[in-house]
Amino acid sequence: MWGLPNIREASSMYKRMPSREREHAIVADNAGNLDMEYLENGKVQETTNPSWRLSLPHVLVATISSFLFGYHLGVVNETLESISLDLGFGGNTLAEGLVVSICLGGAFLGSLFSGSIADGVGRRRAFQLSAFPMIVGASLSATTKSLEGMLLGRFLVGTGMGLGPPVASLYVTEISPSFVRGTYGSFIQIATCLGLMASLLIGIPAKETVGWWRVCFWLSLIPSSMLALAMEFCAESPYWLFKKGRPVEAEAEFEKLLGEFHTKSAIAEVSKSDRGDDMETVHLTELLYGRHFKVVFIGSILFALQQLSGINAVFYFSSTVFRGAGVPSNLANICIGIANLSGSIVAMLLMDKLGRKVLLLGSFFGMAFAMALQVTAASSYIPSSGELYLSVGGMLLFVFTFASGAGPVPGLLLPEIFPGRIRAKAMAVCMSVHWVIVRSRILSFNFIMVVNFFVGLLFLRLLEQLGPQILYSVFTISCLTAVVFVKKNVVETKGKSLQEIEIALLPLD
């Protein structure tokens, strides 16, 4: 009612002011307790960001899906040997690889349909749908007496794992204030890390206690049920509501997430990027060959390079690799969990300060250096004591640098750069790369990128056939390739609203 400009206009004005005047103009209250301040000329300006406290509970509930993602990735790490002995396929490395990787086949299907589900029923209902197969699949895995039952249970869990991560990235990006969007996006990686650590710690008694691996699967039902129930009380994405032609409900959700003073400006921002075609169906050909091809291509390659770095080989079979270096598996897994959590915390602290691109570059370069240490450790010229330190140190450094950039950034960056109209389906396409195979058409050349499914299925056999030196050299090259790709193609989105990013990257034709 006082003719207040929106947040972006106020922010732009402050950037043009001399630093001393800006210090007098801006209120030092980043928590959003005050929403206006008098300038020296007596005018009133909206100066603060929305309160981060309003959206935080909704973000925390959404990250339960990421916790489950991490838990189910790591639940077979400590328990795989016990599972194979109890179900009668001990010593069969192919069957063990299938138990690990079959959930990734389910994840491919889940991620493939995640965009249609999220756009069709909304983000909240999509979370609840992702929890259902994880509950059923974990129950089946916990009660099975055969390899076939275990594979079916893991496949069902995988469908929920594939649906959850892209929806979590969408939801957190769409409900977070821009000034903490990077920090909140890092919560996804931290939750994944905590899930991994929980599965490793809970799985420790599996080797001494008969049937303990069944308890590990049963315990996953607790967070799955919490996710399904808590989502009933969370806000729906206002961007999805606006896209569906429900602006009144979108405004109500913005008020719940941002506060009353920032609701009108948020609705105005969403309206700016509305080209009137949001209700039209998004076809796959439009993502692969149309004007959206560039951003979808960047997203797909970024996820492929993330997986080709070798990170899932580290997570899935860290116990085996460390055991070969003479390190007890329990200690190794705890150290990896700490390194993962520490890197995730670093990313959370720096995401909205240094920006997404800087973290990606530093992360991939650090991962390349860490893998180079692994290559050196595998050399016949290194004494056994030096091999131990280089192997363990390189593995821990690799996990730390991954968690500080390459892990959390892609899942946050891609929903930011995708226009609202294609955001859900484009994320589905890119997350499918995260799981199995993507064919990309570049300058008339077709190439195949083999990612998570085959890494999980074939890593042990590759390690046996190629040897660690060659395999880790391939991972090193992948990380260096990622550095070059990020430098040339990734744009910075730090501190920008989703509408500012969309208008900048995809101007009207």
Image: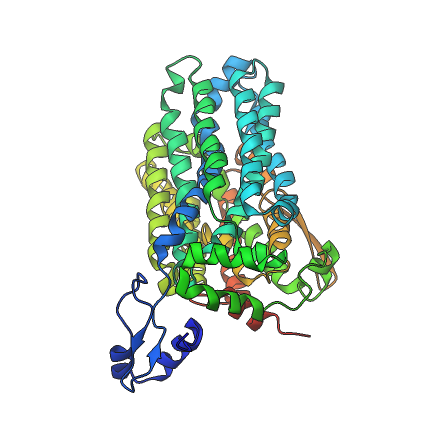
Q: Is residue 505 above or below residue 200?
A: below
Place of residue 14 in the rendered image (x, y in percent of width and height, measured from the top left) = 35, 79
Place of residue 496 in the rendered image (x, y in percent of width and height, measured from the top left) = 46, 68
Foreground residue, 266 or 167? 266
Name which residue lies at 47% across and 52% down.
172
On the rendered structure, is 405 left or right of 330?
right
Quadrant in which the C terminus appears? bottom right
Q: Residue furthest front?
A: 1
Quadrant in which the N terminus appears? bottom left
On the rendered structure, is 275 left or right of 3?
right
Place of residue 280 in the rendered image (x, y in percent of width and height, measured from the top left) = 72, 59
On the rendered structure, is 284 left or right of 203?
right
Foreground residue, 374 or 51? 51
Foreground residue, 429 or 134? 134
Q: Is residue 488 visible?
A: no
Place of residue 171 in the rendered image (x, y in percent of width and height, measured from the top left) = 51, 51
On the rendered structure, is 84 left or right of 112?
left
Q: Is residue 137 visible?
A: yes
User: Could you say which quadrant of the image residue 101 lies in?
Assistant: top right
Q: Is residue 362 above or below residue 155?
A: below
Foreground residue, 483 or 505? 505
**Count of marks placed on residues:** 0
Name which residue lies at 49% across and 45% down.
472
Q: Is residue 427 above or below residue 319?
A: below
Q: Residue furthest bottom?
A: 41
Q: Is residue 400 above or below residue 209?
A: below
